[in-house]
């Protein structure tokens, strides 16, 4: 039996929030960056974007992650106030877990000797900042002086150690230690202070705020020494700041959709050297909310999640965009004419095009950006439905969506299926029955008298199979605009979730919410492969290999299972933990490649190698 190996991962983008910055960090030694999406922490190599590692052990939404100074460990935090410290390589072994604050943690930082960690955020009462020994969790100081959520904290990279914090009470606080004690506080900002960072040489630190200002302070005494010039400054909230490796420049990003590079003079003031803009649609999703300057990479993150990589040594060069999905990817489509191209859609209405071996290849912009529940793509057209009774047909021209037409079918679409060889013919299932469409005309709405949960139409439009809440499969022949019931197949013990014909039209496969899949012979309607009962939860999706020899199923239990039709179901290939939170999309791009997508907003390409 073959085995499956992960060959490529197309990563999700960072989870962002309107009106808030996000703090990304990196490891200059390995050129990796860290960011969070949902409960996952993503480790991404900037020089090899298809190499992605995901840590999914947090029980709550992850907020921030940082490498230890030696690059061996990663500390990550979540909204419950928990910090987990785990190995950066191999199996990401958990070293320690501490409950640090009673609310969400917004920032954390290692001490330069890697012995202590400071974390800040929200909490009940006074404890909004804590510093602790990384191995024992014992406190190393008292942090008074903040009254509201502390958005950012920093550890001075040289002795004598200092900790600085800033937050929603407009304050910048300065602590000496260890053990750390409150020394002084500044109120130079007139709005939330979003990010605070020490220069690499430990001589100065900078704060940036929603009042559009950046202020520099002396790191030993905490005295204000200068600020970023308002000339050619930001016109919106500044969300994040990052120092250049040599400590002579800083990078800032703002809600005004620009990033700026500032030269910091000897006297501690900053002047704009270059303003960077990322090509985009100009909507809110282009606001910049995170940044990082690491080695030669100048990294910015937009509200839409797009990561743009500029080169510090050549800032005029157009940035390399790395983008993708932020939310659950509910469906995948591999284009028949070019199986290297994958289209994926997530329920927030985003359609992304990927190319095997390259990764992200652009977003497909639709004129009307509706939410997407069902999605199907054929050569020149994308058909989708959202949560509003409409079926949309978008023509597909290369990388762009052309004209869109919609048809209102009068009820919420549950499932849609296209007859590939009979252009324009589509079958849509609704609660009470099915709707037959030609182009954007409803040719017939058929009430079937049972609750419909899934449907499929044959490639040539001659036959349809409809699955019900009761687990029965109803086979219909289609003649013109009428459906005639030919047979009812009873084998499933749960609501049918998905039905698919094999590419050669000789078989079909069905799966249910009670974790079972069945392969049937289309002519005799006998069961061809049974006992496909190896998932632990509802099956969400299934796919046939192009040569009709294999069926793959994906489930809520995070696994993908691949069965060979002419072997027993027990000799299956199982990919455990394919997607944190469940697998929702599956497709074969050729006989030995399976593409999967899921709740974790990532897409993975698996290669099957015969044993």
Image: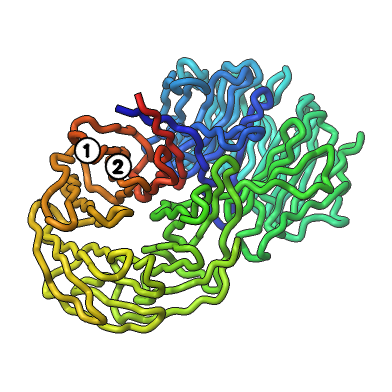
Residue 549's tag is 2
Q: Nearer the viewer, residue 37 or 602?
A: 602
Left or right? Give the position of 155 relative to 435. Answer: right
Q: Earlier in the sequence, mark 1 or mark 2?
A: 2
Q: Which residue is mark 1?
A: 566
Residue visible at 23% across and 74% down in the picture: 434
Residue 463 image position (x, y, % from top left): 23, 68
Residue at position x 86%, y 57% in the image: 232
Circles 1 and 2: CB atoms closer than 8 Å: yes
- Where is the N terminus found, in terms of image quarters? top left
The quarter of the displayed image where residue 59 is located? top left
Front residue of 233/72: it is: 72
User: What colour-coding does the image apply?
Assistant: rainbow
In-front residue for pair 326/112:
326
In this rendering, would 304 be left or right of 531? right
In the picture, the disc for residue 602 is none
**Residue 153 seen in the current view:** no
Label 1 crowd bin: few (<14), some (14–19), many (20+), radius 10 Å? few
């Amino acid at each position: 039996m073959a085995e499956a190996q992960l060959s490529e991962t197309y990563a999700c983008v960072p989870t962002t929030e309107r009106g808030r910055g996000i703090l990304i960090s990196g490891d200059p030694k390995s050129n990796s960056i860290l960011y969070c999406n949902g409960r996952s922490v993503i480790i991404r190599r900037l020089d090899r974007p298809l190499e992605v590692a995901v840590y999914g052990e947090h029980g709550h939404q992850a907020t921030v992650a940082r490498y230890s100074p030696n690059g061996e460990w990663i500390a990550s935090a979540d909204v419950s106030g928990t910090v987990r410290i785990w190995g950066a390589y191999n199996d990401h072994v958990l070293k320690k877990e501490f409950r640090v604050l009673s609310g969400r943690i917004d920032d954390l930082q290692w001490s330069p000797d890697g012995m202590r960690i400071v974390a800040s955020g929200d909490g009940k009462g006074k404890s909004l900042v804590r510093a602790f020994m990384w191995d024992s969790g014992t406190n190393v100081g008292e942090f008074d002086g903040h009254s509201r959520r502390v958005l950012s904290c920093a550890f001075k990279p040289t002795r004598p150690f200092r900790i600085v914090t800033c937050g929603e009470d407009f304050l910048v606080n300065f602590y000496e230690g260890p053990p750390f004690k409150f020394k002084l506080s500044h109120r130079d900002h007139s709005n939330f202070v979003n990010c605070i960072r020490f220069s690499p040489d430990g001589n100065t630190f900078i704060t940036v705020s929603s009042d559009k200002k950046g202020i520099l302070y002396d790191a030993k005494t905490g005295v204000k020494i200068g600020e970023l010039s308002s000339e050619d400054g930001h016109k919106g909230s500044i969300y994040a700041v990052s120092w250049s490796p040599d400590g002579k420049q800083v990078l800032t990003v703002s809600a005004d959709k620009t990033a700026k590079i500032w030269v910091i003079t000897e006297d501690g003031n900053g002047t704009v050297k270059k303003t960077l803009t990322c090509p985009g649609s100009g909507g809110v999703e282009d606001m910049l909310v995170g940044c990082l300057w690491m080695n030669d990479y100048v990294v910015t993150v937009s509200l839409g999640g797009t990561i743009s990589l500029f080169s510090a040594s050549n800032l005029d060069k157009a940035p390399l965009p790395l983008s993708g999905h932020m939310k659950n990817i509910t469906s995948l489509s591999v284009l028949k004419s070019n199986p290297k191209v994958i289209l994926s859609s997530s329920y927030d209405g985003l359609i992304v095009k990927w190319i095997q071996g390259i990764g992200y290849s652009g977003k497909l912009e639709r004129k009307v950006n509706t939410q997407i529940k069902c999605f199907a793509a054929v050569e020149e057209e994308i058909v989708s439905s959202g949560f509003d009774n409409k079926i949309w047909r978008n023509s597909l021209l290369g990388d762009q969506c052309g004209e869109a037409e919609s048809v209102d079918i009068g009820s919420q679409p549950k499932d849609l299926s296209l007859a590939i060889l009979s252009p324009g013919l589509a079958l849509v299932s609704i609660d009470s029955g099915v709707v037959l469409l030609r182009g954007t005309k409803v040719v017939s709405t058929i009430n079937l008298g049972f609750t419909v949960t899934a449907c499929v139409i044959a490639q040539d439009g001659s036959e349809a199979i409809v699955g019900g809440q009761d687990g029965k499969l109803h086979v219909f022949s289609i003649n013109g605009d009428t459906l005639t019931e030919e047979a009812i197949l009873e084998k499933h013990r749960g609501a049918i979730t998905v039905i698919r014909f094999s590419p050669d039209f000789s078989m079909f496969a069905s799966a249910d919410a009670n974790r079972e899949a069945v392969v049937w012979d289309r002519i005799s309607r006998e069961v061809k492969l049974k006992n496909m009962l190896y998932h632990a939860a509802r099956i969400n999706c299934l796919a046939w290999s192009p040569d009709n020899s294999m069926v793959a199923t994906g489930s809520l239990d995070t696994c993908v299972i691949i069965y060979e039709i002419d072997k027993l179901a027990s000799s299956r290939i199982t990919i455990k933990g394919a997607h944190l939170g469940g697998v929702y999309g599956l497709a074969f791009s050729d006989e030995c490649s399976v593409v999967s997508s899921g709740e974790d907003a990532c897409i993975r390409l698996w290669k099957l190698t015969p044993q």
